[in-house]
Image (cartoon, rainbow, N blue to C red):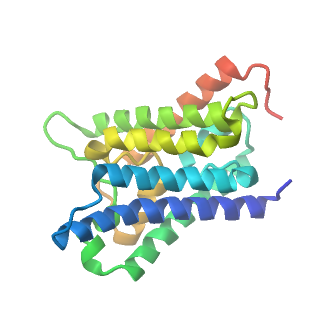
Amino acid sequence: MYNLPQKLVAEFVGTFTLVFIGAGSICADQYLSATGQSGVGQLGIAAAYGLAMGLMVTAMGHISGGHFNPAVTIGVWVTKRLSTLHSLSYWAAQLLGGTAAAYLITVILPDATWRSKALGSITPDLGGDFTRTHGMALEAVLTFFLVFVFFATAVDAKGAFNKIAGFAIGLTITMDILFGGPFTGAAMNPARAFGPAVATAHWSNHGVYWVGPLFGGVVAGVLYDRLFLRDQPPA
């Protein structure tokens, strides 16, 4: 068994990787476009984000559970599969990891590659009929898919893909970004939005990325737990 400090390091490293690669891929796309080259595009950004999550869940899942996302953690907490102390500690590690990754990008990369996009800070494309409420609803649904798949593969001991949960979780993120990316950025993760927001002081519509993902995570966790984990009560 791993102790709490070891689990927190795993959550920090996993979230750091997720934000560093996720935000970094947006900066890379901006750099390529600015220099007249073909950018990585939406598919490339989605793949980078999904690969980062999938690899980190595979590498660190046996240590901390591989949450790397407050929305996942709250889903596990609300089903009483993680204590309140551990949940709050996970949140702190995740937010610190996302913030450290964002600041490191600003140190390493030239300003022109990230400043115009605010380091890939997530901002919903609000306009016309697409409001903050729509943004929160979309983030909630996308996060529901992510947390539901997390429970099915990483929490459910009978899940057919338990040992390769990272693959399924990574693909879910890629799928979600391909749809939600143009509208909200498809954060599905408060830490993903929080880190770049802190590093760039870019807080526009930031609440969308807390309300939506946390609500979606709670609904997914409770639904999967009540329907499919009745024979696997919390330890």
In this orientation, which residue lies closer to the viewer: 21 or 129?
A: 21
Residue 73 seen: no
Q: Quadrant of the C terminus?
A: top right
Work out whether residue 134 or residue 35 is closer to the camera in this orientation and state it: 35
The residue that appears at 54% across and 64% down in the rendered structure is 16
Q: Is residue 187 left or right of residue 55?
A: left
Residue 195 is situated, as x and y percent measured from the top left of the image, at 45, 63
Q: Work out whether residue 21 or residue 117 is closer to the camera in this orientation and state it.
A: 21
Horizontal side of 18 relative to 45 (left or right) equals: right
Question: Which residue is at 40% across, 71% downward?
Answer: 199
- Place residue 44 in its image quadrant: bottom left
Q: Residue furthest left?
A: 128
234 relative to 113, above or below:
above
Residue 109 locus on image (x, y percent): 36, 79
The quadrant in which residue 166 appears is top right
Residue nearest the observer in this picture, 126 or 60: 60
